[in-house]
Image: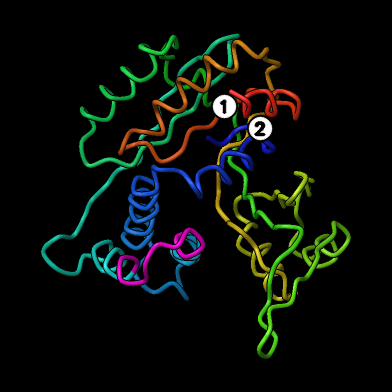
Amino acid sequence: MSGHSKWATTKHKKAAIDAKRGKLFAKLIKNIEVAARIGGGDPSGNPTLYDAIQKAKKSSVPNDNIDRAVKRGSGEGADAVNYETIMYEAYGPAGVAVLIECLTDNRNRAVSDVRVAVTRNGGTMADGGSVQRLFQRKGVVTVSKTFEVEEGRKSVTHEVDEDQLMEATLEAEPEDIVDDGESFEVISDPNAFVEVRKAIQAAGIDYDSAEVEFRADFNQPIELDDARKLFKITDALDDLDDVQNVFTNADITPELAAALEED
């Protein structure tokens, strides 16, 4: 789930060792297919495809799977794909806004599955636009505070601080740099985030992910019991093949995240 950034970081680490690895791979592959369909199969001329491929590689998706996904998305072969993006909106406990991004080849299946996942776990579907207006699209480049670089025959650990990131990206005009504990998030206008990512690379700094996502205009305070109920909803949504991303405006504090991890 994407939402409060510190909890998103925690969830990302858990996903790396999660039994749902196959579902994660499938969603990353679908991202590649859609990016290739929209912008062509050459990552050097299609930044969205480039970032989708890099994200898949960092999640250990095999290169053969990535190559086949690019070809399918580009319309090569008999198994070319055609997905559409659909946004669904819902409310969770304590009035938390939930924005659900789907990539699907079957709109009827997607809306039925999303509705069941939300309502069976205590949420309610919302009218179109009532939730999405609370979010803005932002470019987000996530950079770990330490990264490994192969130098000769050995791996050398490099550290990154906020001043380095600011200096590296200044000309690309990021809006904010957020300290997430073990990583930084460089936030930008969605039209500028490719330049931000390129500036980070040009400075010799590794990055974990670079993508455009939805960020809430304000965070909704939430108690532990409601947080547990919320994550029943988001976990059910994440399990759906058609759901690519789930965004919320829940304010998951470090203390709340720690309590949730103990569950």
Whether pointer 1 and pointer 2 mark residues with C-beta atoms closer than 8 Å, the reply is: yes
Residue type, mark 1 in image? Thr
What span is in magenta?
A: 56-66
Rendered view: 9 above or below 122: below
Along the line of sight, the residue nearer the viewer: 69 or 36:
69
Residue type, mark 2 in image? His
- Tell me how far mark 1 sits from mark 2, CA to CA: 8 Å
Decide which of tag 1 and tag 2 comes sooner along the chain. 2
Along the line of sight, the residue nearer the viewer: 182 or 249:
182
Q: Quadrant of residue 68?
A: bottom left
**Where does label 1 land, which residue?**
248
Name the residue at 79% across, 65% down: 171
| SS assignment at label 1 | strand
Name the residue at 36% across, 33% down: 239
Crowding near the residue tagged with mark 1, few <14, some 14–19, many ≥20 C-alpha atoms within 10 Å: many
Q: Quadrant of residue 156?
A: bottom right
Name the residue at 40% across, 62% down: 61
Residue 49, given in percent of the width and then of the height, sits at 43, 63
**Is 201 placed left or right of 167 in the picture?**
left
Rendered view: 258 above or below 63: above
| SS assignment at label 2 | loop
Rendered view: 27 above or below 132: below
**Is 166 placed left or right of 200 in the picture?**
right
Query: Is residue 61 on the magenta stretch?
Result: yes
**Is 51 placed left or right of 68 in the picture?**
right
Query: Is residue 39 on the magenta stretch?
Result: no
Rendered image coloring scheme: rainbow
Residue at the left extreme, as displayed:
78
Residue 88, given in percent of the width and then of the height, sits at 40, 26
**Where does label 2 land, which residue?**
4
